[in-house]
Image (tube, rainbow, N blue to C red):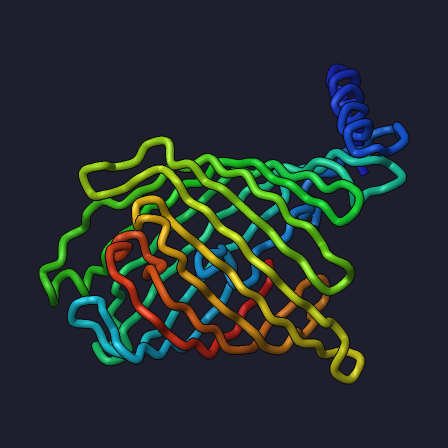
Amino acid sequence: MPSLSEPNRPLAALLWTGLLLAAGEAVAAPAFQMFPASNLYPGYVADPRRPQFSVALLNFPDPQVEDSGDRRVGLKLGGRFGLLRLHSSERPERGVQLDIEAGFTGQFDIEHSLDNLGWDGTYGLLLSSTFGNGLSVQLGTKHISSHVGDEYAERTGRRRIDYTREELAAGGAWSLGPRWRTYAEYGWGYQPKEEIGQEPGRLQLGLEHEAAGSLGGRLGWYAALDLGAFEERDWQVDPTLQTGLLIPSGDRQWRIGIAYHDGIVPIGELFREDEAYVALGVWLDP
């Protein structure tokens, strides 16, 4: 493990001492880790915008996006990647970590030759920390740039409204014992495009249950609820439910299951439409 350079040691030690005192821990020597393999802050399992690798078959009983079919492929690429971690030499699972987050989220219309309806590109820079009693917190900045699919635009004449969102976000997650976790996050869009109806506020809440290894010693199951709301939609609550099997794969974990979403289309360019869908999918935790 690399050590801190001489000029940075006093600053790192001071920062680490303050964090440990705030968490009620005894002061210990700080250690520095580049590109940590794990995250200190958990991803939101049922979040339809979470950057990760996944593919799902989406079925819409009543599609609301103009000239779209009732079956689509939902594709997500990306994840959260650790840059560096400052932690106690005795407790590497606690500390402060800087991460980058990047991803692609898109929908492809099966009934129209898999035309891309739209896609979001996201990235963010996040600072997270974990303390005792199962508490984790994060602060960061996030960017979303949304686009209308070329084939869909050519077929329907729909033009891009240039949806982008620049946001500052703060979140907290709390483990309620070994199998339950809850979280809350608030985002503030600091450059809302009022001409297309954007407003700054965003709120997200969730509850998750994971029973790893409960099915035959290796497989497990999970259930998760995510509630999202945007000020630009008068704080309408958009629920997403997801449940299925947990399959460990090295340091990562696959999820195979079903999801239900009712509310805003999770593509920025389509934020004015509401749709409900049932999904059968595969998700990989980053």
271 displayed left or right of 96 = left
In the picture, which quadrant includes the N terminus?
A: top right
| In the image, residue 215 above or below residue 181 | below
195 displayed left or right of 85 = left
Residue shown at 38% from the left, 67% from the top: 262
Instruction: Give the quadrant of residue 118.
Output: bottom left
107 displayed left or right of 52 = left
Instruction: Give the quadrant of residue 31.
Output: top right
| In the image, residue 90 above or below residue 280 | above
Residue 71 position in % (x across, y down): 31, 79
Front-most of 24 and 49? 24
Front-most of 234 and 96? 234
Farthest-out residue, left: 157
Residue 153 position in % (x across, y down): 15, 60
| In the image, residue 215 above or below residue 282 | below
Front-most of 149 and 182? 182
Front-most of 232 and 283? 232
| In the image, residue 75 above or below residue 93 | below
In the picture, which quadrant includes the C terminus?
A: bottom right
Residue shown at 68% from the left, 68% from the top: 210
Residue shown at 35% from the left, 79% from the top: 59
Label count reads 0
Residue 266 position in % (x across, y down): 36, 59
Residue shown at 42% from the left, 36% from the top: 188
Residue 235 position in % (x across, y down): 37, 49
Instruction: Give the quadrant of residue 116.
Output: bottom left
